[in-house]
Image: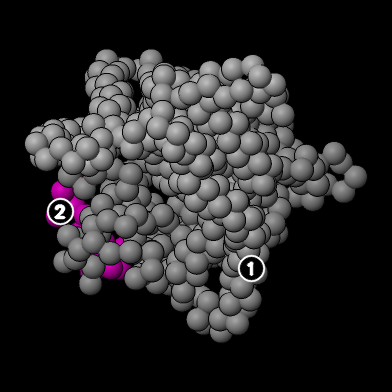
Amino acid sequence: MPGTKRRFLSDLWTLTKPYWKSEEKFKSGLLLAVIIGMSLGIVYLNVLFNEWNNLFYNSLQNKDVDAFFRLFGRFAILAALFIIVAVYQIYLRQMLQIRWRRWLTERLVARWLDAHNYYRLRFENGLTDNPDQRISEDINGFIEQTLSLTLGFLEAVVSLASFSVILWNLSGDIHILDLPIPGSMLWAALLYAGIGSVLTHLIGRPLIRLNFFQQRYEADFRYSLVGVRENAEPIALYGGEAQEARGLSVRFAGVVSNWWAIMRRQKRLTWFSAGYSQAAVIFPFLVAAPRYFSGAIQLGGLMQTASAFNHVQNSLSWFIDAYTRLAAWKATVDRLTGFAAALEALESRRGEGLARTEAAPGDGLTVADLHLRLPDGQPLLSAQSLALAPGRRVMVAGPSGCGKSTLFRAIGGLWPFASGTLAAPAGERTLFLPQRPYLPIASLAAAVTYPDAPETYGRERIAAALTDCGLPHLAGRLDEERHWSQELSVGEQQRLGFARALLIAPRWLFCDEATSALDEAAEQALYTLLTARLPDTAIVSIAHRPALARFHQRVLRFTPTPGAQAPYTLEEAATAA
């Protein structure tokens, strides 16, 4: 257990330290100092309210009308100050929260997107599921919980120190074996809260693990729902509603099952905490009543003693009241530190895959001593060399599943399970066209020119590219924002991908079955357009239709190699130009 606490504190410090040492430290530090000052101000106002209790109830007992109304005026001033401080403490804390969230979100998003980490995370054995939730919900929850719990703890400590002195001075002696024990009320509060804290921890400890898994199950279920929305058309065409319903039901069953476990554990904790809180209302009166009835203290002293006792008891019971939030906080910290650790591990392995060197300007793209593996380590492809000359066109052929797309991923720097050396001239643009080009939820112009801005090319060029690629009906919709990957057919998306290639005019273009959804006539028309418009672009195409060979000077074949270390190697064969 001590090791677990130390690890949690270490993880917490790892998450919080960068922000408080960043360029934001002065402004946010000043903001935090003001918030802490307001928290201490609230404690001081509570001390003044406690003194007011004594005077007010004594005025009632003594039937002192003048003191009664005078104390009402004093109460109005204290209440107004309390309201002002409470309002601005919350406002400033929310201001600090959004500043911290913006900084941490930008930092984690930058690390997630850097060096293809967002892609490589999929190979980390599922230890970093749902990065979208960790970046959006977990960061927000972490910061809100950190500020709320730490400031609440600070208030509890200061309040404990302040009211312990008051309670000590108000308490009479108790005698045990004829020995006077001073500060009886303070010792009673310490004993009451101590027993409650220990029992709360024993009852509520499983909530930490349960909250961690609840966040995971909720994120998995939400991800499955998004998957149905993103793939609505193929699911409908397959009539896969029943299968999707079963899959969603299985995901949601995890949510429900874990939620029931949380409910049962929370019920036990609530039984205890509710009883504990109700008993705390009457307990100080039971302890202090003998002194009141004996005449040692007046009604005001009794009420001040009870108020001070409750402040001490509440401060000591902070752990009890915050236990559920502490459990959720611990789960959130674990998820964020796990995500950060995974990114750090990827950053420490930066450069996995093909080693990249710079070739002389005008030279081609070459890969030497190429070896591709599957994530489980099984060999996939071995080749001594692969050369792609500028402006030349090569078709990649081979059986399905042999690793053609994996070869493209390795050349693009995505596939970490590769070795060899890739040499390419610096500063030359490369573009990959997959079967379904990525289309952001944005204006049509932005979708066509992605990842460049539409202003780079201008409306006329974008409209002309769409028209040339067989999409004249879209040329007038450049300003419309749609979920284009759902609105356009796969064939239209592939045509749009070719329009993107015409605009960007890359030096190296890799087409991974980029015309698979088109008929042969449309396919040949697009390749004719591509070779005519981009004569200096080297085009490498993965394709299964033999008719495409006439648009390429060479064919690169995946050839089986039975008994060899890798199941496939590469062979080049000349074709008709």
Q: In this rendering, does residue 260 appear at all? A: yes
Q: Which residue is mark 2?
A: 459
Q: Position of residue 73 (x, y in %)?
A: 10, 36
Residue 504 lies in what quarter of the image? top left
Q: Amino acid at mark 1?
A: Ala
In the depicted view, which residue is nearer to us: 9 or 299? 299
Q: Residues within 10 Å of mark 2 (few under 14, many from 20)?
A: some
State the SS at label 2.
Answer: helix
Q: How many residues crowd mark 1 within 10 Å: few (<14), some (14–19), many (20+)?
A: some
Q: Which residue sits furthest front? A: 294
Residue extent of the magenta highlight:
456-472
Residue corresponding to mark 1:
253
Look at the picture and state if 403 lies above or below 487.
above
Task: Using residue 53 as the reference point, say whether residue 513 is left or right of it.
Answer: right
* Direction from residue 402 to residue 422 in the image, left or right: left
Q: Which amino acid type is shown beneath numbered disc 2?
A: Arg
Label 1 element class: helix
Is 462 colored magenta in this rendering? yes
Q: Residue at x 35, y 70 (%)?
A: 488
Horizontal and vertical percent position of residue 439: 36, 56
For the N terminus, give its image quadrant.
Answer: top right
The residue shown at (50%, 61%) is 222
